[in-house]
Amino acid sequence: MFRPLDSLQFRVTAALALFVAVMATLIVLALFAINERLENDLLDGIVAHELGELEAEYPIEGEAALPNSATIKAFVVEPDALGLLPEALRPLPRHSTGVNLSYGGRSYRVATTIINGKRAYLTYDMTAIEAREAVFRIALIVAVIIVFALALPLGIWIARISLKPINQLAEHVARLEPGAPGEAMAERFDGYEVGAIARAFDRFMQRLDGFVERERSFTADASHELRTPLAVIQGALEVLRQDPRFTDSAPLMRIERASRQMADLIESLLFLARDESSNLSSEQHCRADIVVGELLDAYRPILGNSTVQVAAMDHCPVAAPRIALVIVFGNLLRNAMRHGGPNIRVTLADNVLSVADDGPGMDAEQRRQAFERGYRYGRGAGLGLGLYLVQRVAHRYDWHLRLTSRPDEGTRVEVRFARL
């Protein structure tokens, strides 16, 4: 079952959005790291320069060499007079190139050294720089949020534009019908990446059209070549039936039974070989009760020891051609005659056709394989196609099959027709 989350467009959109999100996150993290590194290098350079000038000028000028501006301040104290310093500066080591400290509600970059045996501290007020850095961070975060918000619609738009040729190719392929003349796709999609796929589809459709044409020719030839000898056999049987010497001939009855079964099998196979499911029309209806009655009359001469009891035969129109009912009921009836007991019960009521017998029944394994092609069991096993053909026809017309059977209790097969 197709789900929107499995679509190629969704996956392309998700991939683009994820790519944009990952790249935007990496760029923001890189900008944060670069900004932090540049800020530290700049501040370290400033405090190192000012501290170098202080080291050069203090021995000469004394206290007059101490800078005392809005952003730069310096302190030079005796080692035993650290109490004169702001409390945050006291624990610092004698030599440091740059330390971040906060005191008095402001942030500072601090460097320390020793000048003439005294402890020297130089502080640079970076409160304004950190405020601008905070604004910069907020701006980057807002930009990332905007990019995230635009990534999804942008990804949808890009995916829709990029996948438009693929969607057009898919729609074109969906309209293709084997054997029906169609426009070559290669020319239409020439210049697109899907052009190679279109050319491959064109080659495939050419081979498929050739296969369909051969299949149609075979079906037409088989219909004629197989029916003709059967018609001759059945005609000869009718002539022989008129001879009193062969009225009750067992070999003649076996030949008649085999020819009828062969005719039904050929009709079934030819019907299933044709693609009639796509050509159903309102005229393809039949009366299931009439078809079942006709088949019962046709099969009575070859029932042998079996007895058919009709429990109910309701009026039942079905949206399917007559041959479909012939295949289904004919195979169910023949299976009951071949594998069941002497009593067969046929019921057609409430849109359900059922055929039941009182034969040996089937176990669980036999029931599981009953509708498989070529599966045979029990006495008088045929080709293993009966229930398989029934299932094929039922699937074609959306009929529901139900098989119930137990050993020594018989078998019952129900066909529930689709309601009109």
Image: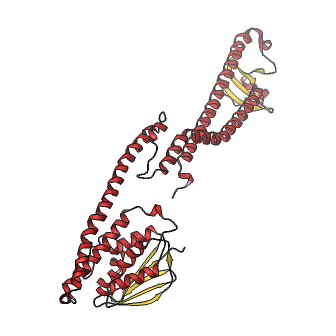
Vertically, is 131 above or below 373? above
Which residue sits at x=46%, y=43%? 183
Q: Kindly give the residue lying farthest to the top in the view shown.
A: 60
> Is residue 89 shown left or right of residue 153?
right
Which residue sits at x=58%, y=42%? 160
> Is residue 270 shown left or right of residue 241?
right
Is residue 97 in view? no
Image x and y of residue 50, in percent: 71, 16
Vertically, is 132 above or below 373? above
Q: What is the quadrant of the C terminus in the image? A: bottom right
Vertically, is 350 above or below 391? below
Image x and y of residue 182, in percent: 45, 46
> Is residue 8 shown left or right of residue 52?
left
Image x and y of residue 227, in percent: 28, 69
Instruction: State the residue in front, 406 or 90.
Output: 406
Which residue sits at x=29%, y=83%? 338
Instruction: State the residue in front, 210 or 283.
Output: 283
Image x and y of residue 273, in percent: 36, 63
Asked which quadrant contains residue 67, the reply is top right
Instruction: State the residue in front, 30 or 257.
Output: 257
